[in-house]
Image (cartoon, rainbow, N blue to C red):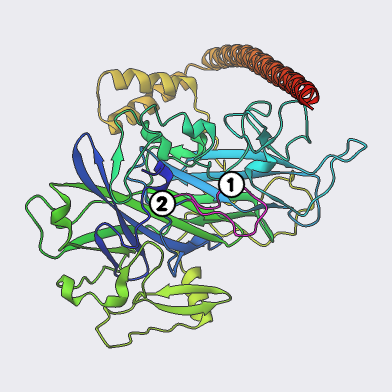
């Protein structure tokens, strides 16, 4: 029996897996309420292209466990576990550093935003501050790691036991939540599985868990345990063409905006299929992992299907691929035609059939024809051709002109006309009140729009002929409308102020409750420590008494 985080430690996938093109493909086998199921996972990696569509690059392996930085200073994972059986919602995680825009700064804002059309479906910001000097001033910094060790927390904090700032000791946190600076953990990174906030979701029977090849999912498991992203970085679904905006997290630019590549993962199940085993599995994108230091983005798709028993899995081969717009996948006709180099294992990525071209240190995937066994299929592009292709990508806005480096992160970003995050909403054209009234009256009669406009215009003409009386009435009506609007705005401001005061009162009450709990926890710890010391003293006293008694007995005997 092994913990949930170590569900799969075998050298091979439960079902043979192969990649068609630049992708990582794997499977996991699990049982829930007696039903055995297979989850198929496909992963693709992309380079972040500023003001353009992400470029498909050579794949990384699927991580069957959370990946930690080798020799680094962080105790939290830099990549979440990607082969979980199911994610209830889609999630986005970010690792890397916050960067000063031009020169060292004492404070900046790091912001993660995901735009779908003109709506921000995810928008989270964190204040990044330098270390506190002895005189109380913030020290300037060039970059700051976005890790839990720099965020609000401390020993005993369920949300972040690695953090600082709680418990009355240690330095204040460098990463501070914008929405709840005194209570929320300000971090974009994956939450470690051993954090109490995730362990609490396991239930009583889930802590003893799972065989090495088949994950026996307990019925009392809260499936959100498999989420590694903070709750405010989860969303209902990913469409695949969203725009990503990273502010304060990339070197050399204050804000990086790039778009998901409209890719989709597709799967075919080859080999001798038993009854009930599908030919293909629908996959959904449910994990986006962004590494701002590497300028990379990994997207993971997932889908499941039930099977009768493990015996039906042996002859199967799961072939997965990532399909881009206008670039359909060319599938092998059978499992026998899949090259051996395309077969994958949990610890490695098999050789794939894509072609690559160098752009600096990044390998850009260039789609080519379907490879044949024993034939080297290449399709080279020069650096200039790749840059030209990226420049031709269609954008929903005009590319922003070059702007001088900002010396302060608080300076507003330059607006991009037409971008979904640009608040360039056209002002409404004022209309005479009588035209609006006529329009409302005509709508009640369900008349065509052409009759509506003509009637409204005729009404306006007849009223204009009445002379100054109509003009005075219109001015008075406009004044009344303005006064009503001002009154409504004042009421809205008053309601907003009241809501803010109530929220502040709730926050203060929560902070006081948390402080009381922390104080009680410290007192309990001190009482336990005092009890242990008393027990040790008692035991030492008894030991000394026994030794003295034994020594007296030996003296009498001598």
> Where, by quadrant of the figure, is residue 195 drawn?
top right
Q: Residue 339 has which mark?
A: none
Q: Tell me the distance, in whole angstroms, between the alpha carbons under discs 2 and 1.
A: 16 Å
Give the percent coordinates (x, y) of residue 488. Answer: 57, 13
Image mark count: 2
Specify which label sits upstream in the sequence, 2 or 1: 1
Camera sees residue 486: no
Give the percent coordinates (x, y) of residue 351. Answer: 37, 75
> Where, by quadrant of the figure, is residue 129 drawn?
top right
Instruction: Establish if 435 lies above or below 1.
Output: above
Instruction: Establish if 86 lies above or below 533.
Output: below
Give the percent coordinates (x, y) of residue 555. Answer: 81, 25
- Of helix, strand and loop, which mostly describes the magenta segment? loop
Residue occupied by mark 2:
82
Residue closest to the eye, 192 or 263: 192
In the shown orientation, is residue 331 left or right of residue 385? left
Magenta stretch holds residue 74: yes
Q: Residues within 10 Å of mark 1 (few under 14, many from 20)?
A: many
Camera sees residue 175: yes
Residue closest to the eye, 460 or 309: 309
Residue found farthest to the left = 275
Give the percent coordinates (x, y) of residue 438. Answer: 38, 20
Residue found farthest to the right = 135
Q: Residues within 10 Å of mark 2 (few under 14, many from 20)?
A: many
Element class at badge 2: loop
Q: Residue at x 53, y 32 (%)?
A: 196
**Quadrant in which the C terminus is drawn:** top right
Q: Residue at x 61, y 59 (%)?
A: 293
Which region is colored magenta? 66-82
Residue occupied by mark 1:
76
Magenta stretch holds residue 450: no
């Amino acid at each position: 029996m092994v913990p949930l985080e170590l569900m799969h430690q075998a050298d091979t996938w439960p079902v043979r897996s192969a990649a068609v093109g630049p992708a990582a493909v794997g499977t996991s086998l699990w049982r829930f309420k007696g039903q055995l199921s297979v989850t198929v996972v496909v992963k693709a990696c992309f380079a972040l292209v500023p003001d353009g569509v992400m470029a498909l690059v050579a794949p990384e392996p699927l991580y069957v466990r959370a990946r930690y930085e080798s020799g680094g200073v962080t105790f939290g994972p830099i990549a979440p576990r990607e082969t979980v059986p199911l994610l209830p919602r889609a999630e986005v995680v970010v690792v890397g550093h916050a960067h000063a825009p031009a020169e060292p700064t004492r404070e900046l804002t790091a912001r993660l935003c995901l735009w779908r059309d003109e709506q921000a479906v995810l928008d989270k910001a964190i204040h990044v501050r330098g270390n506190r000097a002895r005189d109380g001033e913030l020290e300037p910094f060039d970059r700051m790691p976005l890790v839990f060790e720099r965020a609000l927390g401390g020993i005993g904090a369920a949300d972040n036991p690695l953090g600082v700032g709680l418990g009355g000791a240690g330095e204040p946190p460098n990463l501070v939540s914008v929405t709840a600076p005194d209570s929320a953990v300000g971090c974009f990174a994956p939450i470690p599985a051993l954090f109490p906030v995730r362990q609490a979701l396991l239930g009583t029977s889930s802590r003893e868990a799972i065989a090495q090849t088949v994950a026996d999912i307990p019925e009392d498991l809260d499936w959100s345990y498999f989420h590694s992203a903070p709750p405010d970085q989860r969303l209902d679904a990913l469409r695949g063409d969203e725009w990503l905006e990273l502010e304060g997290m990339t070197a050399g630019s204050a804000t990086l905006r790039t778009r998901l590549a409209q890719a989709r993962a597709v799967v075919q199940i080859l080999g001798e299929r038993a009854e009930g085993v599908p030919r293909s599995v629908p996959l959904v994108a449910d994990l986006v992992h962004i590494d701002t230091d590497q300028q990379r983005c990994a997207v993971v798709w997932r889908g499941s299907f039930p099977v009768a028993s493990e015996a039906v899995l042996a002859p199967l081969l799961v072939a997965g691929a990532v399909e881009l717009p206008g670039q359909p996948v060319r599938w092998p006709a059978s499992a026998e035609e899949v090259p051996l180099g395309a077969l994958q294992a949990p610890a490695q990525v098999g050789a794939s059939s894509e072609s690559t071209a160098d752009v600096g240190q990044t390998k850009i995937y260039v789609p080519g024809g379907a490879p044949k066994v024993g034939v080297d299929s290449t399709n080279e592009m020069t650096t200039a051709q790749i840059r030209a292709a990226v420049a031709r990508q269609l954008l929903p806005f005009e590319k922003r002109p070059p702007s001088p480096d900002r010396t302060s992160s608080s300076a507003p970003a330059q607006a991009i006309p037409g971008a979904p995050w640009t608040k360039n909403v056209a002002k409404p054209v004022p209309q005479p009140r009588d035209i609006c009234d006529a329009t409302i009256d005509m709508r009640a009669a369900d008349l065509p729009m052409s009759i509506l406009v003509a009637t409204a215009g005729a009404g306006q003409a007849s009223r204009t002929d009445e002379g100054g009386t109509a003009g005075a009435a219109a001015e008075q009506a406009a004044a009344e409308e303005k006064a009503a609007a001002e009154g409504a705005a004042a009421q809205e401001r008053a309601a907003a102020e009241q809501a803010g005061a109530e929220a502040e009162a709730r926050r203060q009450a929560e902070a006081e409750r948390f402080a009381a709990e922390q104080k009680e926890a410290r007192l309990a710890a001190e009482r336990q420590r005092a009890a242990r010391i008393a027990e040790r003293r008692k035991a030492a006293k008894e030991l000394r008494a026994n030794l003295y008694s034994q020594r007296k007995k030996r003296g009498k005997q001598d």
